[in-house]
Amino acid sequence: MNKVVLTTEIDSGLNRALEEIARFDNRSASDLADQAIRNLVEERLATRDLLRHGLHLVATGDIRAVDSAAVHDWLTSDEDTFPKAR
């Protein structure tokens, strides 16, 4: 795997906490930062793919959707019955 150097600024308190965790885990702070970034990227890509898939299902009519305004109104009301999908 090709590696590149990423230079960034973080809060000094966050850096101290990262270094403490790294010492406890017997790993480098760089390894922990690499894993944290990897986890964030994987989560964001999966979320994006899920949203795209859901929007595709709605656009093709393969799934019915509940209007967001109806959900908002339901959340702010005393109603027990969830709004109907369209």
Image (cartoon, helix red, strand yellow):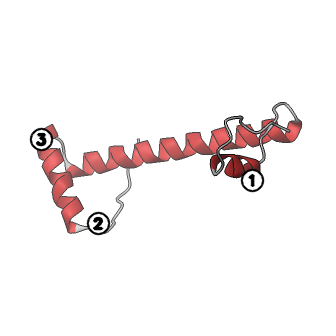
Q: Position of residue 74 (x, y in %)?
A: 69, 46
Residue wearing tag 1: 69
Q: Residue at x 34, y 59 (%)?
A: 5
Using the rendered view, name the quadrant where residue 13 is placed. bottom left
Do we see residue 30 in this rendering? yes
**Viewport quadrant of the C terminus:** top right
Measured Cα–Cα span from mark 1 to mark 3: 48 Å
Position of 44 relative to 80 (above/below): below
Q: Residue at x 49, y 41 (%)?
A: 42
Q: Is residue 1 left or right of residue 22?
A: right
- Identified by mark 2, the residue type is Ile
The disc, 1 or 2, on the residue closer to the chain's N-terminal end is 2
Residue wearing tag 3: 24
Q: Could you tell me which secondary element the residue under label 1 belongs to?
A: helix
Q: Residue at x 34, y 48 (%)?
A: 34
Q: Could you tell me which secondary element the residue under label 2 belongs to?
A: loop
**Viewport quadrant of the N terminus:** top left
Q: Position of residue 82 (x, y in %)?
A: 71, 36
Do we see residue 2 in this rendering? no
Position of 4 relative to 36 (above/below): below
Q: Is residue 1 left or right of residue 72?
A: left
Q: Could you tell me which secondary element the residue under label 3 belongs to?
A: helix
Q: Is residue 2 left or right of residue 83?
A: left
Using the rendered view, name the quadrant where residue 17 is placed. bottom left
Viewer-nearest residue: 17 or 25: 17
* Badge nearest the viewer, 1 or 3: 1
Position of 33 relative to 25 (above/below): below
The disc, 3 or 2, on the residue closer to the chain's N-terminal end is 2
- Identified by mark 1, the residue type is Ala
Residue wearing tag 2: 10
